[in-house]
């Protein structure tokens, strides 16, 4: 069962909220979950600084080009990272880890991303997803058996979910585990695109299984050396060339009962929960990588002179730098607010982590392109870092849930609570007037309450009240737009993916604005409004621009050319080509 945070809405009794982002689709802002801004633990901050210093020291001895040539970050580097405590950041100290919070873990992963994308991915595969399932769902015996070696870097972990016929649609994996009379399981199947493929010692793998006569999923802990567990060919990738990406083959692998993770039948839920956590890491990693790009860009435009003055003085250059700074501030705020939700014990952060993943990976891609543009022709040369950065990060919007799929997930998951509420109204029976009155009264009362006294953000600093009021209106509009789409399309809404994208973008921009307002409110409380003029400037800019994007998306829900776009695509499919060439060969 998901733990839910209890909040008391103004003028309403205390009730449970499973997710802050999901509540936005209901027109509710459960501000007690996100105000005040989550304060970091001072003692942990000291440990994080030491860990980051160690990471930078080890990273300074890495040659990214050599990593690409040798196709691996190096066993020696992994040993050094393990000895420095960087391979088991969130693992409890009794198992040899650092015991960091989600916020602390994210802070260190920012540093990995600044050093090198391949390093951050190798360690992310190991920690964010590789043995996260053992940490979250393992028995005490499993934790004692596996975590000490994994946290110390003596062993590496991997995560084996993706298959040739199951990428974004992970539910449809075909690998199968069959229960044996002695309680063990025999596993057959194939996985692809598995990081740390030949370097990993422990893999969390997923397969179909039969439980009580039903086809379900199971999570299994596989160990290198198990008979029938074969490492296949390595993929020749565009970027992240130091990541050992492989096919894995399971040929009658006998997995003992003590290596079953969780209960048989829980495999898919375990996989999704692990990926929820990994997506936060991609968001905060994007923050770190963008900081490095921004530093490179600022240094260049201040020193490079053209037409008799520094590039930094040209308006179009200023616009690019300002966009990177303000958008990065919003992304950073959103990612670390999500980390704060996790640390506070809110277990359902699936939407928030997906929002961070989508927003972070796409912003990083555009930021890298703009930083390279500012570098000019020199940025195209291989002795500069930009081409490698672009190759490395291009996969980020694809793995751990392709961003188009994630947008559908955000929208449909967010719509579900409202859809359930509307279905109650849709099931009214006029032949049962007594039963009808109660359901109708509850719904109408809720609707009137939202119209007469809509949710407001009351905990924001007064200096930011204009933006808070605007966000409150956006939340109300999100509820209205979602309700209208559900009424218009019913169950067919699952096929309206362009509309889903709009809802996803709207809730993402709303969540980011609230994160900025919470962060800057705390800054104002600590430092005062006048001394915090720079943060206010950025907050004004970010919130105004995000609000404009929300208005545009809301408008597109009402008026769009979706049908024409669909028709154009279908015609292209039918022709099998462009079909409108100006000249014919």
Image: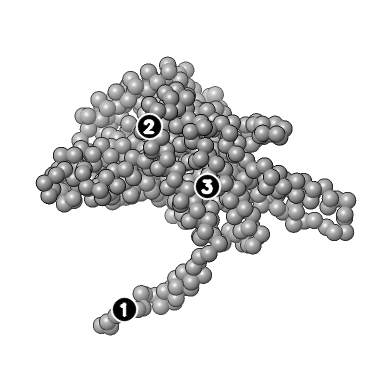
User: Horizontal and vertical percent for residue 67?
Assistant: 23, 39
User: Horizontal and vertical percent for residue 175?
Assistant: 50, 49
49 left or right of 409 in image:
left
Residue 581 numbered mark, or none: 1
User: Horizontal and vertical percent for residue 264?
Assistant: 60, 39
Residue under the point 55% across and 47% down? 474
Q: Nearer the viewer, residue 471 or 478?
A: 471
Q: Which residue is mark 3?
A: 507
Q: Is residue 325 above or below residue 171?
A: above
Bin the neighbour count of mark 1 within 10 Å (Cα to Cα): few under 14, some 14-19, many 20 and up: few
Residue under the point 36% across and 33% down? 534
Residue under the point 43% across and 18% down? 42
Marks 1 and 3 sit apart, C-alpha to C-alpha, by 40 Å
Residue under the point 58% across and 33% down? 458
- Closer to the chain start, of discs 2 and 1, is 2
User: Horizontal and vertical percent for residue 258?
Assistant: 54, 31
Q: Nearer the viewer, residue 253 or 208?
A: 208
């Amino acid at each position: 069962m998901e733990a839910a945070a209890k909040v008391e809405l103004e003028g309403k009794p205390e009730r449970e909220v499973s997710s802050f982002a999901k509540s936005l689709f209901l027109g509710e802002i459960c501000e007690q979950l996100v105000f005040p801004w989550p304060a970091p633990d001072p003692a942990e901050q000291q440990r994080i600084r030491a860990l980051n210093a160690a990471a930078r020291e080890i990273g300074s001895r890495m040659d990214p080009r050599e990593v690409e040539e040798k196709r691996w970050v190096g066993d020696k580097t992994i040993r050094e990272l393990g000895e420095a405590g960087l391979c088991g950041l969130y693992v409890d100290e009794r198992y040899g880890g650092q015991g960091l919070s989600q916020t602390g873990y994210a802070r260190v992963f920012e540093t990995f991303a600044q050093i090198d994308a391949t390093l951050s991915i190798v360690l992310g595969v190991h920690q964010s997803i590789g043995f996260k399932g053992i940490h979250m769902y393992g028995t005490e015996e499993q934790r004692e058996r596996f975590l000490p070696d994994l946290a110390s870097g003596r062993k590496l972990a991997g995560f084996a979910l993706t298959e040739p016929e199951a990428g974004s649609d992970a539910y449809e994996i075909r690998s199968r585990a069959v229960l044996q009379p002695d309680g063990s399981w025999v596993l057959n199947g194939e996985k692809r695109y598995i990081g740390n493929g030949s370097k990993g010692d422990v893999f969390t793998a997923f397969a179909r299984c039969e439980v009580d006569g039903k086809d379900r999923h199971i999570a299994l802990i596989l160990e290198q050396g198990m008979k029938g567990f074969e490492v296949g060919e390595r993929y020749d990738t565009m970027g992240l060339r130091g990541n050992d990406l492989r096919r894995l083959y399971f040929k009658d692998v006998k997995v003992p009962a003590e290596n079953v993770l969780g209960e048989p039948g829980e495999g898919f839920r375990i996989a999704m929960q692990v990926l929820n956590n990994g997506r936060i890491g991609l968001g905060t990693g994007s923050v770190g990588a963008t900081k490095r790009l921004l530093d490179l860009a600022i240094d260049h435009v201040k020193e490079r002179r053209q037409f008799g003055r520094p590039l930094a003085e040209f308006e179009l250059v200023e616009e690019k730098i300002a966009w990177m700074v303000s958008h990065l501030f919003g992304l950073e705020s959103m990612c670390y607010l999500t980390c704060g939700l996790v640390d506070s014990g809110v277990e359902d952060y699936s939407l928030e982590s997906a929002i961070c993943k989508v927003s972070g990976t796409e912003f990083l891609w555009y930021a890298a392109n703009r930083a390279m543009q500012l570098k000019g022709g020199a940025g195209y040369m291989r002795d500069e870092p930009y081409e490698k950065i672009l190759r490395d990060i291009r996969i980020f919007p694809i793995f751990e849930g392709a961003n188009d799929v994630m947008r559908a997930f955000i929208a449909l998951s967010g719509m579900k609570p409202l859809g359930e509420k509307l279905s109650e109204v849709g099931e009214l029976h006029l032949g049962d007037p007594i039963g009808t009155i109660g359901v109708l009264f509850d719904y109408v009362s809720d609707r009137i309450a939202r119209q007469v006294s809509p949710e407001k953000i009351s905990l924001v600093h007064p200096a930011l009240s204009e933006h808070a009021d605007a966000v409150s209106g956006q939340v109300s509009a999100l509820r209205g737009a979602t309700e209208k789409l559900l009424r218009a399309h019913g169950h067919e809404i699952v096929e309206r993916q362009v509309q889903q994208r709009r809802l996803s973008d709207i809730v993402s921009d709303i969540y980011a604005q609230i994160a900025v307002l919470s962060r800057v409110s705390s800054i104002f409380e600590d430092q005062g409004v006048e001394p915090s003029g720079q943060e206010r400037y950025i907050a004004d800019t970010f919130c105004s621009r995000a609000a404009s994007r929300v208005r545009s998306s809301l408008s597109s829900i009402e008026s769009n050319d979706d049908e024409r776009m669909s028709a154009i695509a279908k015609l292209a499919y039918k022709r099998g080509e462009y079909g409108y060439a100006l000249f014919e060969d």
